[in-house]
Amino acid sequence: MLSQLAILFIGLASALGCRTGTEIVSNQDWWKTTAFYQIYPRSFKDSDGDGVGDLNGVTSKLDHLVDAGVGALWISPIYPSPMADFGYDISNFVDIDPLFGTLDDFDALVARAKQLNLKVILDFVPNHSSDEHEWFKKSVRREDPYTDYYIWRDGKNPDDTGKYEPPNNWLSTFQGSAWEWNEERGQFYLHQFVKGQPDLNYRNANLRKEMENVLSFWLKRGVEGFRIDAINHMFEDDRFLDEPSSNNANVSAGYYDSLNHIYSKDQPETYDVLQSWRDLLDKYAQESNTDTKVIMTEGYANTDLVMQYYTHGSNIPFNFGFITNTRSGSTAAEFKSVIDSWLDSMPENYVANWVTGNHDQRRVASRYGSNRADQMSIVCLILPGISVTYNGDEIGMLDGEISWVDSVDPAACNTDAEHFEQYSRDPERTPYQWDSTTSAGFSTSSTTWLPVNRNYVSLNLAAQKAVSHSHYHVYQAMTALRKLPIFKRGSLSVEVLADNVLAITRSVTGATPIVALVNCAESSVSINVKNSIAVLDQMTVYTSSVSSGITPGRNVTTSSVQLPVATTIVLTSPRLYQIVHGA
Ligand code: NOJ
Ligand code: MG
């Protein structure tokens, strides 16, 4: 079916309209239009019944990724860890935590992924290690070459008992001072995250070499790239000056957002280190004659700073626009502005990316409302470039309800019973809902590390496969559509139509465009699409948001398209619809 489609489109002139889509040519470009999928391994699939997900669990479910139409998986940390930040506190960068399995299990995962033509991306956490890492223990004892592997500073103003104040006012992202006193060394160390995550010192050449060795270790084990964690925290201004107040009256003293982080974040040296990692990955790909190795970078920062990651080696500097700048109630104009702002800021010949969720953010269906979950899948998958989906969002999973007493996330536990909900990341981390059996098919154990959302009996993958129209089907339909040349080569136009409707159009000369219509209004609307877009008089609904009541396959008259509240539909020519459905 898809090959027929390819034939239909191949040969169409690629004279491109408003915006040039991504050119895809060789295998080196495999990543440029791929749907990426994030796996949070603690919560994906538990193979040994201990209530925590693991590598063999992931391997057993790789077929799901193929079925969903994704091409690459990014796995959150699986390395040995005391789990103070659930794996983002790493005590050995080149091994697997027994909770998740063994290096052999990892090799088996990679081998299975290769059979399925899935690319495996690992999380690389350069900013910090665990305080249980050997390097840190040796650094505490001032054993060379480890003495300066971390950011150590003297304290200030000793009191009568000889107790010091921290070197400056810097704060941890998880609240409170970013400095922890170490009695044995007689100095403070910096931790921008929890105190079990001491920051590494990138001004130390030996440390940099060690981290390069970490990258090489995993490349040799067959990974296809890295998601780089918290990249904009890697360097600190070496004057260690106090940071100014953010003057945000809504944030209490001691909370991270109460300061403006001009010295502890977004420092220019970061880009040089990133470039050196790019070079390392390229050299490896060249020498091993393998596909391009991908770098995804996580940096919540202003657009200018994020764009510089592109030009210093990141293929995918995460675009968090749909997380930080749009939400339930956002207008079509606001969506358009997020899309335009990324595309207009992106340096030429780079590839856009669209992130809908991750393990640090409330789930898409909870942020936008269940009736708009499909809207976000459709928008991200119809836009040019890369989509990044957090596991479970393809079935519209909702945030779990986790009480203060049951909270385990340090971002929640470092606050109090009154404030934790605003900070907790537990709700989006509840186990994946596979089916309606014990623990949603996630584990054979009835107790799991975070409770399974009670809605699993009806909200699960198996149930969504069994009905004719579900969130999962929408997601699948969109990933299938993306494999067409029109998505790889076609142009893009983003418009606001009357009455708060967002229209996203992909087209190549000579073919009927494919159009997504998003009703952003809180009421139903009727619009004339033909007025502004070169559609046929009659188009077919290729896919539609589940709550719209509009069945895929229905024909619509484009001079008068009815869009019930919160509806998103994708229109194709009747002929394309028939080809896709084998009619
Ligand atoms: C960003 C990760 O996504 C988050 O989960 C983690 O807590 C911090 N970086 C620290 O590694
Ligand atoms: Mg397990």
Image: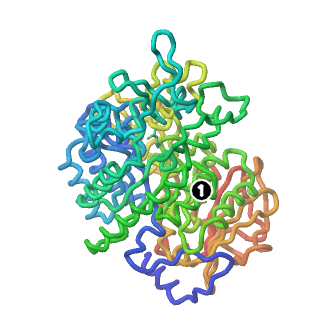
From the viewer's perspective, tell me whether residue 512 is left or right of residue 90: right
Give percent across and percent down for residue 556.
69, 68
Task: Depth check: give the residue in front, 61 or 583.
Answer: 61
Colouring mode (rainbow / by chain / secondary structure / one colour): rainbow
Q: Is residue 226 visible?
A: yes
Callout 1, which amino acid?
A: Leu
Position of 294 relative to 147 (above/below): below
Q: Residues within 10 Å of mark 1 (few under 14, many from 20)?
A: some
Give the answer, above or below, for where 25 lies relative to 165.
below
Residue 394 makes an appearance in the image: no
Residue 28 picture location, percent across and down: 38, 74
User: In the image as oriented, which residue stretches furthest toward the top?
Assistant: 160
Residue at 42 percent of width and 34 percent of height: 152
Q: Where is residue 495 in the image (x, y as percent from the top left)?
A: 74, 66
Residue shown at 44% from the left, 35% from the top: 430
Res 526 → quadrant: bottom right
Percent x, y for residue 545?
A: 60, 54
- Quadrant including the N terminus: bottom left
The residue lying toward the viewer, choosing from 205 and 295, is: 205
Query: In terms of secondary structure, where does tag 1 sit?
Result: helix
Q: Which residue is drawn at 53% across and 34% down?
A: 173
Name the outermost residue toward the left. Answer: 104
Question: In this image, 268 relative to 492: left or right?
Answer: left
Residue wearing tag 1: 305
- 166 and 582: which one is in front? 166
Q: In the image shown, does 55 or 524 lie closer to the viewer?
A: 55
* 113 relative to 504 in the view: left or right: left
